[in-house]
Image (cartoon, rainbow, N blue to C red):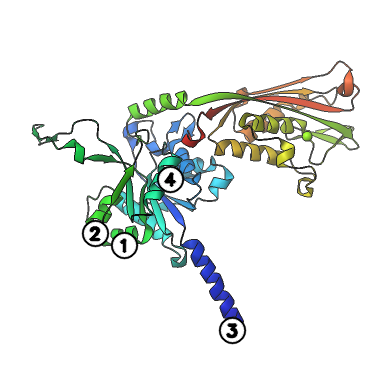
Amino acid sequence: MCLDLLKKAGQMWVMGQGLAHLHAAIVVAAGRGHRAGGGIPKQYRLLHNEPVLTRSLRALCAHAKIDQVICVIHPDDHALYQNAVDRLPTQFKQKIRPPVSGGETRQQSVFAGLKALAKPETERPEIVLVHDAARPFVSDALIKRGLEAMTLHDACIPAIAVIDTLKQIDAHNKVMATPDRSTLVAVQTPQIFKFALLFEAHQHAQTKDGLTDDAMVVEHMGRAVYVFEGEARNIKLTTDDDFIRAQLEMASSMITVTGFGYDVHAFDKGDHVTLAGVKIPYEKGIRAHSDGDVILHALCDALFGVMGDGDIGQHFPPSDPQWRGASSDHFVKFALDRLHQRGGQLLHADVTLVAEAPKIGPHRKTMIETLSHLLQLPEQRIGLKATTSESMGFTGRKEGLAASVVVTVRMPEKEDHHV
Ligand code: MG
């Protein structure tokens, strides 16, 4: 009994140590934001075929010190939210907690997020970052600076210098004063706080309206807030113009990369082969550790190739018994996940199968549909060709199959930007 209690106390101590460093982020995505056009709230609009929210979430999840992320969303937006989260790499999805519904104001929405993070009490984070869903360009370096600033203070917000001269005006557009620009800064998100401080400040400010950011909620309680260096590119997408400018800037920071993959497998006893994820009846089978899908294996190597990320044998060693008979779509999903983690986007895949037999003609349509689903690519962005080798060589002698695949990918020039 005594020993059990000691053990329990030990576990709690270890848990406590871990939790003391837990960093959580709240992403405020409950706004309706139709000002930007596009027919849906701006945080779900697409930027280069990806929802703004997906990019904002990827930037936060990619930061090593952020352990969990929770979104505050509008109750009508569940399907849009799910679509945005589904596009994240698996490893990042694991950091995402179920979303909570927002309130009428930003202040109420953040409070809802804080209340969700406060439960259970034993797992409260030490630090919380509050970020606008519509700021998808936040960089890893900015988050790092903010967390460094938090080692000195309890509340830190990113800020940039005000470049334009500011005027104070009255209701008739008459200039009343010119504030001294040198004492002013423009603030951004993520705003970072000790969780306990921000939670207390929001409880304290419940009956107070018009607090437009979290720093103001903390200021209202009379506590100090400090600024750290923000970034001009960390803009909040608000108008249609912002989206146009962002698309242009992103295009200029992306590069197009080509990857090539090649694979061969020998025939063996059996009654089918698997090609592009489709089982094709045949008088022989494939000798392989996995399902021996030459098309999907070549595809994986093409994807690893664009990332300079080794090859399929390195990620899935044939000596590892867990891949025995494995369905090769698992390998492709893994490679795609790694591409998405780097902010890459597959644009096109071109496949050539070299085989005397079996004939793939009758299965072509199913193979393209399967690839389209697996790669999340439109069918017209997938090339699938087959050739014989005119009875020459190992394929000509029907000893096996070969496939080569070329993929075209758009990648951020600098990984840090997550664009
Ligand atoms: Mg292979």
The residue where tag 3 is placed is: 2
Amino acid residing under circle 3 = Cys
Viewer-side residue, 131 vs 35: 131
Q: Is the residue marked by circle 2 packed among few (<14), some (14-19), or many (20+) residues within 10 Å?
A: some
Residue found at x 44% / y 63%: 119
Left or right relative to 281: residue 67: left
Q: Secondary structure at mark 4?
A: helix
Confirm or deny contact between disc 1 and disc 2 (CB under 8 A). yes
Q: Earlier in the sequence, mark 3 or mark 2?
A: 3
Confirm or deny contact between disc 3 and disc 4 (CB under 8 A). no
Q: Secondary structure at mark 1?
A: helix
Residue found at x 50% / y 41%: 83
Q: CA distance from mark 4 to mark 1?
A: 25 Å
Q: Quadrant of residue 208?
A: bottom left
Determine if residue 325 is in view.
yes
- On the image, the x and y values in percent for residue 22 come to 47, 57
Q: Earlier in the sequence, mark 1 or mark 3?
A: 3
Which dot, 4 or 1, sits closer to the camera?
4
Circle number at residue 200: 1
Determine if residue 105 is in view.
no
The residue where tag 2 is placed is: 221
Q: Secondary structure at mark 3?
A: helix
Left or right relative to 91: residue 59: left
Q: CA distance from mark 1 to mark 2?
A: 9 Å
Amino acid residing under circle 4 = Lys
Q: Earlier in the sequence, mark 3 or mark 4?
A: 3
Amino acid residing under circle 2 = Met
The correct choice, above or below, for 6 with respect to 308 in the image is below
Circle number at residue 144: 4
Check mark 4 vs ligand 1: CB closer than 8 Å? yes or no. Answer: no
